[in-house]
Image: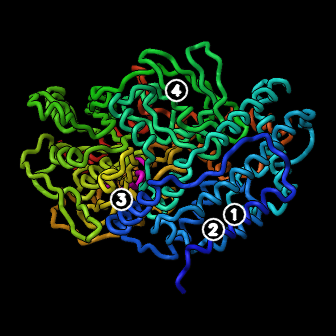
Amino acid sequence: MKKTLFLRFIPFWILINALVFAGSEPTTVNFQPLSPEPQHRQVSQVVAHLLRETHYQRKALDDALGAETFDRYLEKLDYQRLYFLESDIQSFEQYRYMFDDYIGSGQVQTAYDIFNLYEKRMAERLVHVFALLEGEPFDFTIDETIDIDRENDPWAKTPAELNELWRKRIKNEALNLKLAGKDWAGIRETLTKRYERTKRNVEQFQSEDVFQILMNAFAESYDPHTSYFSPKDFDDFRIQMSQSLEGIGARLTTENDYTIISEIVPGGPADKSKQLHPNDKIIGVGQGLDGEIVDVVGWRIDDVVQLIRGKKGTVVNLQIIEAEALAGAKPKMIAIVRDKIELEDRAAKGDTLEIHHEGKPMRFGVIEIPSFYSDFDGRRRGNNDYKSTTRDVRKLLEGFKSEHIDGVIIDLRRNGGGYLNEAVDLTGLFIKEGPVVQVRNSLGNIDVEEDNDPAVIYDGPIVVLVDRLSASASEIFAAAIQDYHRGIIVGSQTYGKGTVQNALPLQRYIPSYPDKLGQLKLTIAKFYRIDGRSTQHVGVIPDVDFPSRYTLMEIGESSRENALLWDQIRPVPYRELQDFTGILPLIRQRHENRLAGNAEYAKLLHNLDEFKKNRNREIYSLKEAERQKEREAAEADDPDEENPHDTDPDKKKKDLLLTESAHILGDYILLSKID
């Protein structure tokens, strides 16, 4: 049956009036109902057209996609189901299969109507929160619990049910502050400021905010790397790039009122500090070593970014909750010196590592590659010494010739990728001519990226280290080395990002509009190994596995909602350089035997096991004595996994995986009878 769009307007405004004014609490939160701006109709139509016609998946704009967008939109508004009532959700159901029509035609008022009710529900909750904070202190001796993850819980049926959920939520936040040393006066002050900030955020919502939420709900129904940037976000991104990422070198996102570290930029201050990791939560920001820590829970991300940014050389203090910490864990304070990230900071670095293996001294070259970079401006200017990953690694390999090394270790841990051509060219340093990666576009056309240089800079034994944060270009290089049997891959399963994105400024498609428009980033192609397997979703599986805390965390493409799936295409002709069939089982066995009696490895396994037991925990006690006991146990058993980028001069000796990879390389040499 054909759906009629005009039927939605009158009934929904009647619905809003009925729900908002029938028995709701008075509120002091001032907000104005929002409506689409004039340009949103055209932008919505253009975004729908571009995704339908150019995205890799070529999804039809139909009821199924509309329903997916509808669900994702509600999820973005009320992820923890703490604002809407069950009756609200039931009233929205009539629009479930119409969101595709709304977006395709540009008539998006219904999404704004839903948002306006959401904003009203937020106002009602804030009234309740402020009433709680004005009341008596919480009793932390009562034996009760809180469910901290309500994503799949039923919607509350009544305002009274929501009041109880929020009482426990505020009590949990108060308990965390009490465990951090605050008395009730300090708790009340902190939480009042926190929710006053939320109140200001509610009052400052703008039409473009709603439109961006809707467009991203639609875009992410294609895949998690497809997204819409508002004009403001687009400008902020360009400013950030032009300033060479001056700040701490971390990209942020928001989730459930928290600012989350989504990515650590290689070579930046955060990377060098070794104190921040993906999925860490920033809950407070202070200026200088002694500056007051400002609570930023519930803040808009752009406001948090403004606090963190600052002049080069100045210090920013961050109060964080580590990604693997239990609920109520003690926050950690870290200080980072702001700086501008230069290309030199991301450059490949070389060193040597000496071990005794099977009674024989061995010396290995170690090359750490933080990213796949290239100074295109320097190359265009004719600079004969412009920097790139391949050029820098070539120099390091040539330098190793005088060091009389027995083998080379390529360290790609935490390397999130970079330029595709650098991954291809870097592979060429270790193989003769041949294919490196296949790229398939949305039309099914396949391009094969090849190394066309017959020169081999290093033909000795190599090991490549990877972890869950090794992504994209790192996976292309590691996969090629593995497929050619050119070296052994050691570490943990990689990220699994096997897709290619393109950014499209929307002004290009609506040139008649006088003001700035946003940008659409969408997935246009997919990477495949030369043996035909995709790197998407599953990444690269090491030849020799070494566990890491990252493998147990919500990191990697497989943890991303709606990620494109693994598949395979035809392989391209290539020749394996060695036969690992006989030696890999022996190498794995020796590896296991070696670590069986290693105290540091046993400690790592114990910490990972404890984290695994608690990672899916959702119910926590609101009793102070119980939470204090849990905190003390967690602090006594704090994970202490060695950091591969420690600045200590003896870091190589403390880096268990690096040391073990050297022994694996030693086994590889001896078992292959390589001199």
Secondary structure at badge 4 equals helix
C-alpha separation, residue under disc 1 versus residue under disc 4: 41 Å
- Where is mark 1, residue-wise? 13
For residue 621, say whether it is visible. Answer: no
* Mark nearer the N terminus (2 vs 4): 2
The image shows residue 625 at horizontal and vertical percentages of 86, 36
The answer to whether mark 1 and mark 2 are in CB contact below 8 A is yes
Amino acid type assigned to the residue bearing label 4 in the image: Ile
Marks 3 & 4, CB-CB < 8 Å contact: no
Q: Name the image quarter holding the N terminus.
A: bottom right
Q: Which residue is painted at 90% across and 45% down in the image?
A: 143
Question: Residue 40's x, y, as percent?
Answer: 47, 56
**Mark 2 surroundings within 10 Å by alpha-carbon count, few (fewer than 14), some (14 through 19), many (20 or more):** few
First in sequence: mark 1 vs mark 4: 1
Res. 219 visible in picture: yes
Q: Residue 9, labelled with which disc?
A: 2
Relative depth, front residue between 333 and 82: 82
- Closer to the chain start, of discs 3 and 1, is 1
Read off the residue under disc 3: 523
Disc marking residue 415:
none
Residue at image point 54% right, 47% down = 209
Q: In the drawing, does residue 156 fall left or right of residue 459?
A: right
Residue pointed to by mark 4: 308
Q: Look at the image and give the residue range highlighted in magenta.
A: 491-503
The amino acid type of the residue labelled 2 equals Phe
